[in-house]
Image: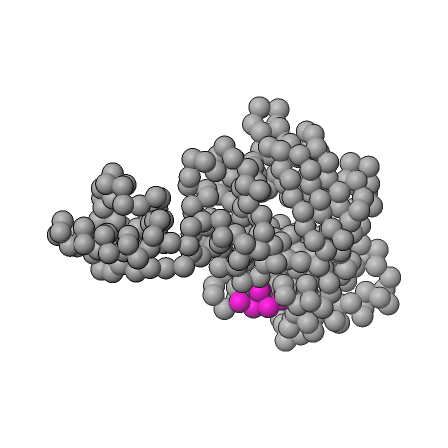
Amino acid sequence: MLAIEINRLIKQYKNGVKALDNVNLKVNEGEIFSLLGPNGAGKSSLINILTTYYNPTSGNVTILGKDLSKNSTWIRTQIACVAQRISIDEHLSLMENMLFQSKLYKVNPEIAKKRIDSLINNFELSKYLKYPTASYSGGIKRRLDIAMNMISMPKILFLDEPTIGMDVNSRKAMWKMLLKIRNEYKTTIFLTTHYLEEAEQLSDSICIMKNGKVLTQGTSKKLKNYINPNMIRITFPSIEQAKKCKYTIDKIGLTKFTNIQDNSILTNVINRRTAFTSINKWLLEQNIEFDSIEIIEPSLEDVFLTLTSSKESEEEEWK
């Protein structure tokens, strides 16, 4: 069964900006779904519509089998949304925050106690019970924030940039928690993130948007098939040298597509072995200083940059 189905969704604001342009999406029940896109892609507008904060201009949205426009009150009881801004009350203890949330959602006190105990245990929060919430790190506050929103046992949990600003260890702990939510509570997770590694590690399905349009949707493996697997990376001593060489390589026609990543050029070629030899020979003949040249397999980051950087991605909706 589908948790979310979106058909030809449009959101146009009064100032004329079209934030969403004929968006079509499907999210399966019980999966982690990641929504990716550069700033201005329409991610926030989409989440605001799905969580009933905004009304769409046109199109149809079905959540858990119900029409969003006709059943928004019921849908609110089935979902939870954790925004970028942490919503815990630092004047209350961990337990008081959890109890307040259970009363807010009108959860039966006996059921609430069992759920709170389970959530504190599963999210490894018990050792923080004796400390004031104001003293918690950002990662622990975020963990508590999500645990609080799980007290109502939502069918769908919306998370907007849940690991932003976290260190590596806190981010890994959050990943572990999100997998628990999916596996143990069977909750569908709708996630936005700018961390492509996060999306690749966690997601059952990934969608990439740009300028209010869906460019592609599918598993990480499927998305990687959208770009030519014949890829070469050339690494230079500095990003300035990489940019200078990219301009020249684009003009001589050795590659189909080039993109800058840090101090490297990522190139898409027709035949990687032939291109590898030709580009390597050309670099040496031109006395161009470079650190390495290698044949690589495309990553999710390569797909993202290729799709969101190409002119075609602005005009074509990938199927």
Nearest the viewer among 254 and 248 is: 254
**For residue 147, side relative to residue 201 (left or right):** right
Nearest the viewer among 31 and 140 is: 31
Q: Residue furthest bottom?
A: 127
Taking the magenta stretch, the answer to whether it contains residue 31 is no
**For residue 316, side relative to residue 58 (left or right):** left
**For residue 224, side relative to residue 130 (left or right):** left
The quarter holding residue 131 reads bottom right
Nearest the viewer among 8 and 133 is: 8
Residue located 28% across and 54% down the image: 274
Residue 193 visible to an observer of this rendering? yes
Taking the magenta stretch, the answer to whether it contains residue 174 is yes
Query: How many dots with numbers?
Result: 0
Residue 130 visible to an observer of this rendering? no
Q: Is residue 214 above or below residue 146?
A: above
Nearest the viewer among 28 and 36 is: 28
Q: Position of residue 198 (x, y in %)?
A: 52, 59
Q: Position of residue 3 (x, y in %)?
A: 73, 51
Residue located 68% across and 29% down the image: 57
Quadrant placement of the C terminus: top right
Q: Position of residue 167 (x, y in %)?
A: 47, 63
Q: Give the extent of the magenta segment.
A: 172-177
**Please, which colouring scheme is shown?**
one colour
Look at the magenta stretch and give its main secondary structure: helix
Q: Position of residue 277 (x, y in %)?
A: 24, 56
Residue located 62% across and 28% down the image: 12
Residue located 58% across and 29% down the image: 18
Q: Is residue 267 above or below residue 201?
A: above
